[in-house]
Image (cartoon, rainbow, N blue to C red):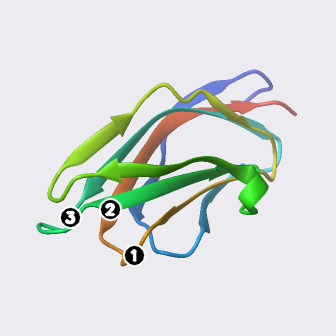
């Protein structure tokens, strides 16, 4: 790897919970651009609401909240372009339970 190399990758895939949790931290020497977030509600009877956090998990770092995902449905949140620097985080939470799976795609760029 060399400075300026850009790597397309799956940044995170897994379940989220009702507590705001960092699911990805940018590695040392890299910058990350998030380009797509896919959310899938595994609950067959209850809709869920998703929140997205960037650069930390404080309420001031919440980019979007109350993104509703209908029961047994998926939603693509594709107009993101979230830029994260070394050490910054991408986090999620849902309103209740732990039945929403999130997949995040983007690019890591080596900066030093």
Total labels drawn? 3
- Does residue 109 appear to the left or right of 93 in the view shown? right
Mark carried by residue 8: none
Residues at circles 1 and 3 in contact by the CB criterion of under 8 Å: no
Tell me which label, 1 or 3, sits earlier in the chain: 3
Q: Quadrant of residue 2?
A: top right
Q: Disc 3 marks which residue?
A: 42
- Residue 105, compared with residue 18, is above or below; it is above
Q: Identify the disc placed on residue 96.
A: 1
Question: What is the x, y in percent for residue 19?
Answer: 55, 75
Identify the mark nearer the N-term, 2 or 3.
Answer: 3
Dividing the picture into quadrants, the one containing residue 84 is: top right
Give x and y (percent) for residue 30.
76, 39
Q: What residue do we see at 80% from left, 25% from top?
A: 3
Residue receiving disc 2: 48
Q: Does residue 83 appear anywhere in the picture?
A: yes
Vertical placement of residue 44 versus 103, above or below? below
Q: Residues within 10 Å of mark 2 (few under 14, many from 20)?
A: many
Q: Given the current orientation, which residue lies at the most extreme top position?
A: 4
Q: Nearer the viewer, residue 3 or 15?
A: 15
């Amino acid at each position: 790897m060399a400075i300026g190399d850009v790597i397309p990758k799956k940044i995170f895939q897994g379940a989220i919970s009702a507590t705001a949790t960092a699911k990805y931290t940018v590695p040392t020497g890299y910058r990350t651009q998030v380009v797509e977030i896919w959310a899938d509600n595994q609950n067959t009877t209850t809709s869920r609401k998703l929140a997205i956090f960037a650069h930390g998990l404080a309420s001031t770092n919440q980019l979007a909240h109350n993104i509703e995902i209908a029961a047994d449905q998926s939603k693509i949140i594709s107009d993101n372009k979230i830029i994260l620097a070394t050490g910054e985080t991408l986090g999620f939470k849902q309103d209740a339970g732990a039945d929403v799976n999130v997949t995040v795609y983007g690019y890591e760029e080596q900066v030093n």
